[in-house]
Image (spheres, rainbow, N blue to C red):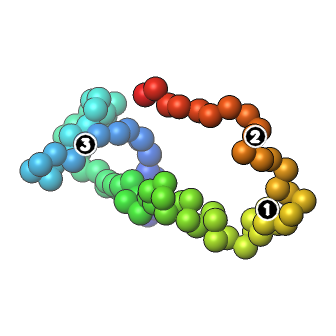
């Protein structure tokens, strides 16, 4: 006999006691047993310096090193000074 399942997506927080605290009540009358799948955000996000280094060394951008791609000079544009 195959049991059917129903999926409910919600978000929450894992607190300091390693307990799952949901942001909103579930639309389920309980008590009832459930199966829970926890999806954690990737912690392998690279910082901006690593991203720029990867882009600068990627051979896909080698065409930008060609002399015909060097179309700007220091005299072009105006300096930008971030006030933030």
Question: In whole angstroms, how far apart are the C-alphas of marks 3 and 2?
Answer: 52 Å
Question: In whole angstroms, how far apart are the C-alphas of marks 2 and 1?
Answer: 20 Å
Label 2 sits on a secondary structure element that is loop
Mark 2, residues whose alpha carbon is within 10 Å: few (<14), some, or many (≥20)? few
> Which mark is nearer the camera, 1 or 3?
1
Residue 46: name its quadrant. Answer: bottom left
- Residue that badge 1 annotates: 64
Label 1 sits on a secondary structure element that is helix
Q: Is residue 22 left or right of residue 76?
A: left
Label 3 sits on a secondary structure element that is strand
- Residue that badge 3 annotates: 13
Q: Is residue 81 left or right of residue 7?
A: right
First along the sequence among labels 1 and 3: 3
Image: 4 above or below 23: below
> Which mark is nearer the camera, 3 or 2?
2
Image: 38 above or below 81: below
Mark 1, residues whose alpha carbon is within 10 Å: few (<14), some, or many (≥20)? few
- Residue at x-position 63% and y-position 63%: 55
- Residue that badge 2 annotates: 75
Q: Is residue 42 left or right of residue 64?
A: left
Q: Residue 16 in the image: x percent, y percent? A: 11, 48
First along the sequence among labels 2 and 1: 1
First along the sequence among labels 3 and 2: 3
Q: Residue 13 in the image: x percent, y percent? A: 25, 42
Q: Residue furthest left?
A: 17
| Viewport quadrant of the N terminus | bottom left
């Amino acid at each position: 006999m195959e049991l059917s399942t129903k999926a409910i997506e919600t978000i929450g927080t894992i607190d300091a006691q390693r307990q799952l605290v949901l942001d909103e009540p579930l639309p389920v009358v309980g008590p009832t047993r459930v199966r829970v799948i926890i999806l954690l955000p990737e912690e392998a996000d690279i910082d901006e310096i690593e991203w720029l280094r990867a882009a600068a060394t990627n051979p896909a951008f080698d065409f930008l090193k060609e002399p015909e791609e060097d179309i700007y000079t220091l005299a072009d544009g105006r300096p930008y000074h971030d006030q933030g």
